[in-house]
Amino acid sequence: MSDIKQKILDQAEDDLIEIENALTNNLRPHLDLVARTAKHILFSGGKRLRPLLMVLSARLCGYQGDYDKTFSCVFEYLHAATLLHDDLVDDAEFRRGSPVAHTKWGNAVAVLTGDYLLARALSITAETGSLKSIKIIAEITEHMSQGEIQQLINKGDLNLSEEDYMAVIYRKTAVLIEGACRVGAIFAGAPEVQEQALSDYGRHLGLAFQMVDDLLDYTADTNALGKKVGADLREGKLTLPLINAYSKAGTDDRAFIGKVLEQKKFSVQAFEKVIDILQKYKGLDYTYQAAAQRILAAKEALSVFDGSETKDLLLNIADYALVRKN
């Protein structure tokens, strides 16, 4: 895992430096409080996956201009906005190992800073003059908002289906990654076949990325994850490992899971027993295999492109999404 991560960092070093600079230069709030709150979430150790995917997708389709890094900020601003809002909705305490923004500046400032980042993303998109891109960014924002609401509605629902789960993670996570890749192609003026290929790559990658996130909530440690493990269970969120295991569990194990979900503030021992149940019914293995299938589909989507360093980097990113530890 460390080898492929380092390989990606080496391949993308120049792009990541330029993206980092662009994120600072294009923020442009009028109020220092907005700047401090936004920078707290923006510069707390994010992977820059979404802006990097947009830049690489445009390059794969032949883009050679100088606005790609600025445009890529859209996807990190959108992502940061959702994190500000989600942390408040979920009553989270930590994000990437640091206290969440609303515990430092209050709920109102966190919400309104998230709103500012959403508006800033749309403003940058508008500067491209691409109505198609503006429409996609607006639709992404709609999807992410409704995905969060859908997840709230689903909390604690032990009858949640895998299909319902997939619909939520598409809206909450995959739609933004899919959009970054698709808009990169549009930005480069790519033909429809390339736009669709990158859209498919991003969708499958995004779904796999979230499935691995949901696995890590049961298998990582707090320091590696940057937030408390078991957070999803404490918040009543049923993710694929639990959904799959529960569908196969016996009466006693089902009853125990239901009791833990009702408690919310459960013990370490109770959480460890839930993990034992997930392992017993192979919910963790099932989720990993489902994510692996999505990664294979993501890589296959790129087959329409000739071999290149950029394509190799996108393939490496797909592999890393499956084996990462945070």
Image: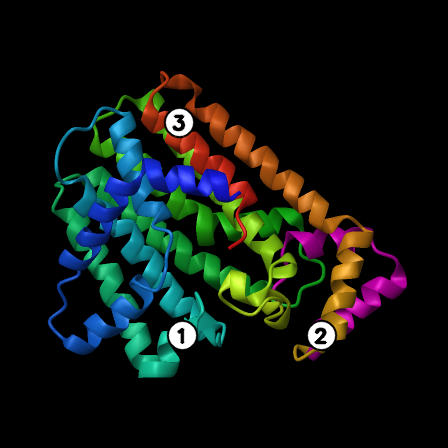
Is residue 201 placed above or below 263 in the rendered structure? Answer: above
Q: Which residue is drawn at 17% across and 47% down?
A: 70
User: Of 104 and 326, which appears nearest the observer?
Assistant: 326
Q: What residue type is labelled 1?
A: Val
Q: Earlier in the sequence, mark 2 or mark 3?
A: 2
Q: Which kind of residue does numbered mark 3 sit on?
A: Asp
The residue indicated by pointer 1 is 100
Q: Distance between the residues labelled 1 and 2?
A: 23 Å
**Which mark, by number, is residue 135?**
none
Badge 1 or badge 2: first in the primary sequence: 1
Residue 9 versus residue 308: which sits nearer the camera? 9
Percent from the top left, x then y, of residue 314?
Answer: 39, 32
Q: Is mark 3 on a helix, strand or loop?
A: helix
Query: Marks 1 and 3, how far apart in space?
Result: 36 Å
Point out which mark residue 312 bears: 3
> Residue 73 in magenta?
no
N-terminal of the pair, mark 1 or mark 3, is: 1
The Cα–Cα distance between marks 2 and 3, rounded to whole angstroms, is 42 Å
Q: Residue at x 19, y 28 (%)?
A: 63
Residue 68 screen position, x and y as percent? 19, 40
Which residue sits at x=79%, y=60%? 276
SS under mark 1: loop
Give the residues drawn in magenta, as a range: 237-263
Secondary structure that dominates the magenta span: helix
